[in-house]
Amino acid sequence: MKDSHGRTIDYLRISLTDRCNFRCVYCMPEEGVCAMSHDEILRIEEIERLVAVAAGLGIRSVRLTGGEPLVRKGVVELVDAITGIEGIENVSMTTNGVLLPRMIGDLKAAGLSRVNISLDTLDPVQFHEITRTGRLEDTLAGIDAALAAGLNPVKVNAVAVRSLDQDFLEFAKLSIDRPLHVRFIEYMPVGDTSVDAGTGWGKEDVIPSEELFDIINERARAAGLPELRPAGATKPLGWGPARYFEFPDALGTVGFISPLSRHFCSECNRLRVTADGKVRPCLFSDTEYDVRTALREGDDAAVRDVLLTALGAKPDDHHDKVGTDRKMSQIGG
Ligand code: SAM
Ligand code: SF4
């Protein structure tokens, strides 16, 4: 499937729910989002049908996200169903990890191959401040469970925020002794970015990846460690928009995802679907196309048309847009 800018689109990111067991300050308000009703969100069979139609158009990879995808009832059955769809080569998930120790066996048996776990700090107090409801040890246990189950790759995504003053070197060092791929993502001012909305973070909190790379190397030198070098054979599968580095002899890598300082829009390969069945051509754009109606009418041709219309509406670039109508928890990151 090619879009009007010549990019191959073969990746579908599906939000399974806008609900979550965390309330991360940059993602949703303390009281949670005004949750969608059961009727509004796509049913498991509807998502399955959507993936089947999308696979027919050329989608090869599916990522399940949210909200927290693991709180969605039927998620294991969904993984099982969509891994069996002809054309789908891999099904992955982005999660806060809390429910992984309990669910990883079933998810792996259902065919989940890759997982991204979000973790923004290694300080338990700061972790609780950021997630409002979470405990660091639960997310760390999720990472352990994913590695123990043999999922490959296991990636840890950390959003870098200047005013949080995270310990970036400690994060990067997680990649040394275990095959973990730590990725630093530039904070994106998405959703209602006004100070009143919660975080008070703005554009000045974005740490450009190049600066972060220098910070990590500077701290590594000060700690008597070698510097990061471009990654070789350890580079994880499904490398997406990240650029990867490694410490010598490390089992994993350190990646940098730079949606703001280095637009990777020219390499964009994806469409997004919200939990209530709206196809979004771009994370930063508020233009959406309803696919739920076509799914409920059982009209595969109309589902195809909606996907193709969204494909045709993909912008060439996000042009540094700040703020979106929906919050990140409703878009799926
Ligand atoms: N609950 C799951 C999780 O946290 O991994 C999946 C959904 S979450 C919305 C997906 C990803 O979006 C997470 O890695 C999260 O850190 C990231 N995210 C949320 N808000 C963000 C923002 N404003 N800038 C950059 N990343 C953000
Ligand atoms: Fe939940 Fe993920 Fe958003 Fe945090 S980032 S509130 S874990 S959906």
Image: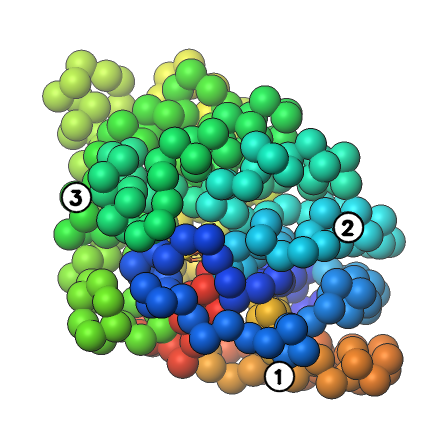
Q: Which of marks 2 and 1 is in front?
A: 2
Residue 6 location, quadrant:
bottom right
* Distance Cα–Cα, label 2 vs label 3: 40 Å
> Mark 3 or mark 1, which has the lower sequence index?
3
Q: Is residue 4 visible?
A: no
Residue type indicated by callout 1: Tyr
Determine which residue is flagged by label 3: 165
Q: Image quadrant for the N terminus? A: bottom right
**Disc 3 C-beta below 8 A from ligand 1:** no
Q: In the visual, does 303 lie left or right of 155?
A: right
* Distance Cα–Cα, label 3 vs label 1: 39 Å
For this orientation, the residue located farthest to the left is 222
Q: How crowded is mark 2: few (under 14 residues within 10 Å), some or many (20 or more)?
A: some
Residue type indicated by callout 3: Asp
Determine which residue is flagged by label 2: 77
> Mark 2 or mark 3, which has the lower sequence index?
2
Do tag 3 and tag 1 residues touch (Cβ < 8 Å)?
Answer: no
Q: Residue at the spot x=54%, y=60% of the render?
A: 66
Residue 145 in the image: state x and y as whole percent. 56, 28
Determine which residue is flagged by label 1: 289
Residue 140 in the image: state x and y as whole percent. 42, 31
Q: Residue at the spot x=77%, y=69% of the render?
A: 46
Q: Is residue 293 visible?
A: yes
Q: Residue at the spot x=25%, y=30% of the render?
A: 169
- Front-most of residues 30 and 307: 30
> Mark 2 or mark 1, which has the lower sequence index?
2
Residue type indicated by callout 2: Glu
Q: In the visual, does 141 lie left or right of 104?
A: left
Residue 179 in the image: state x and y as whole percent. 50, 23
Residue 157 in the image: state x and y as whole percent. 42, 43
Is 106 drawn above or below residue 2 in the view shown? above
